[in-house]
Image (cartoon, rainbow, N blue to C red):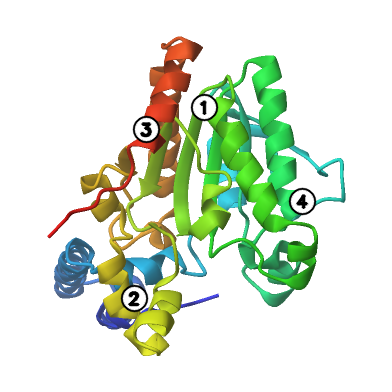
Amino acid sequence: MKQVLEFEKPMLKLREELEDLRRKHAAKPSEKLAAQVSDLEKKLDALRKDIHDNLNPWQRVQISRHINRPFMLDYVKLCCDEFIELHGDRHIGDDHAMPAGFATWGGKKIALIGHQKGRDTKENLLRNFGSAHPEGYRKALRVMRLAEKFGLPIVTLIDTPGAFPGIGAEERNIAEAIAFNLREMMTLRAPIVAVVIGEGGSGGALGIGIADKVLMMENAYYSVISPEGCAAILWKHREHAPEAASALKLSAQDLSQLGIIDGIVPEPPGGAHHDHATAAEALKNAVLEAITTLENQPISTLLEQRYQKFRVLGKYTEN
C-alpha cells in the first residue's frame, strides 16, 4: 500500500526518474547512463536529507501516522528472537489493539506490551485502529505484574491516537482502567522502558507510559490531544492542525528539550516507513541500552527516581 505525503512528492518524482534510468541501464549498459544514475542517486540522497533535516512538527505528525510505518508487531518480528503472546484481562476478554506477552529482545528476556494498528480495513477493525479498550489496559497490567513476579524488565511500545472513546469502553470504565495503570506502574518493582514509536495520544498513550526511561522515535509525537482536536477547540476548525502541532510542542525534539522524555531514537533518512530494518536496529539498541542502565540500579532507587521524574513534570510562569 503506497502513501505519499505532500512534502515527499519531490522525492517521488526523482525516484521514478531514477528507476526509469536504472531500467534503461540494465537493458543497455553504458558509461553515460551509469553516470546519470549516479548523479540522480546523489540528488535524491541530498533532497531526502534536506527534507528530513527541516521537518516541522505537523510533518512529523504525518510521518508518525504513515500507513507503511513499522507498527508494534513489525518491531516484534525485527527485534525479538521470540514472542509469546498472552491473551485476556481475566475480567471481560481480550483486546487485539494491545498485544502483550513475553519476548526475547536481543538476547534479553522481557515483558513486551504495545499498541497495534492495522494497514487495511479488516486489520484495522480487528485492532480497533490502535485504540485500546479497558480490557487492553487491564491485560497490560496483568502482564506487567507477571514481569514483576519473575524479575523481568518491562518494555512498552506506544502507538495510539488515544484510548477508545466508545460507549462500551465508557460502560466498562476506560478512565478507571487507565488511572489504575498510572498508579500501579508507578510502584512496579521492575525496570520499565517506554518508547513512543508512532502516535502518542493522550491518556491512551500514558496508560502504558509510566516508565523509568521514556524514549521516542525521531518522527513520533506525544501529546495530551491530537493537533486536529486542539485546532477544533481553539480555532473551531481542523484546518489549523499545523498551527496546533507547533503550539503543542509534541515532537520528540521539543519534548527532549523540555525534559519530558529521556532520549530520541534516530530514524533512517525520510522516516522509518522508508527502511524498517534500520529503524528496528536503532530501536533494539536503544531499548537494550536503557534496560542495561536500569538493571544496574537497586529497585528502591528506581522507584524513587520514577516518582520524582513524573512529580516534577510541568512548569508555569507568572507575569
- For the residues labelled 3 and 2, the Cα–Cα distance comes to 50 Å
Contact (Cβ within 8 Å) of mark 1 with mark 3: no
Q: Which mark is residue 19?
A: 2
Q: Could you say whether the residue bearing mark 3 is in a helix, strand or loop? A: helix
Q: Could you say whether the residue bearing mark 1 is in a helix, strand or loop? A: loop
Image side of residue 131 versus residue 22, left or right:
right
* First-in-chain label (2 vs 4): 2
| Quarter of the picture holding the C terminus | bottom left
Three-letter amino acid code at disc 3? Answer: Lys
- For the residues labelled 2 and 4, the Cα–Cα distance comes to 47 Å
Residue 118 in sight here? no
Dot 4 corresponds to which residue?
Answer: 135
The correct choice, above or below, for 248 with respect to 152 in the image is: below
* First-in-chain label (3 vs 2): 2
How crowded pointer 2 is (Cα within 10 Å; few <14, some 14-19, many 20+) is rated as: few
Q: Nearer the viewer, mark 1 or mark 4?
A: 4
How crowded pointer 3 is (Cα within 10 Å; few <14, some 14-19, many 20+) is rated as: some
Q: Position of residue 78 (x, y in %)?
A: 54, 42
Q: Nearer the viewer, mark 4 or mark 3?
A: 3
Q: Residue at x 56, y 63 (%)?
A: 162
Q: Which mark is residue 106?
A: 1
Q: Nearer the viewer, mark 1 or mark 3?
A: 3
Three-letter amino acid code at disc 4? Answer: Glu
The correct choice, above or below, for 304 with respect to 89 in the image is: above
* First-in-chain label (1 vs 3): 1
* First-in-chain label (1 vs 4): 1
- For the residues labelled 2 and 1, the Cα–Cα distance comes to 36 Å
Residue 205 in sight here? yes
- For the residues labelled 1 and 4, the Cα–Cα distance comes to 29 Å
| Quarter of the picture holding the N terminus | bottom right
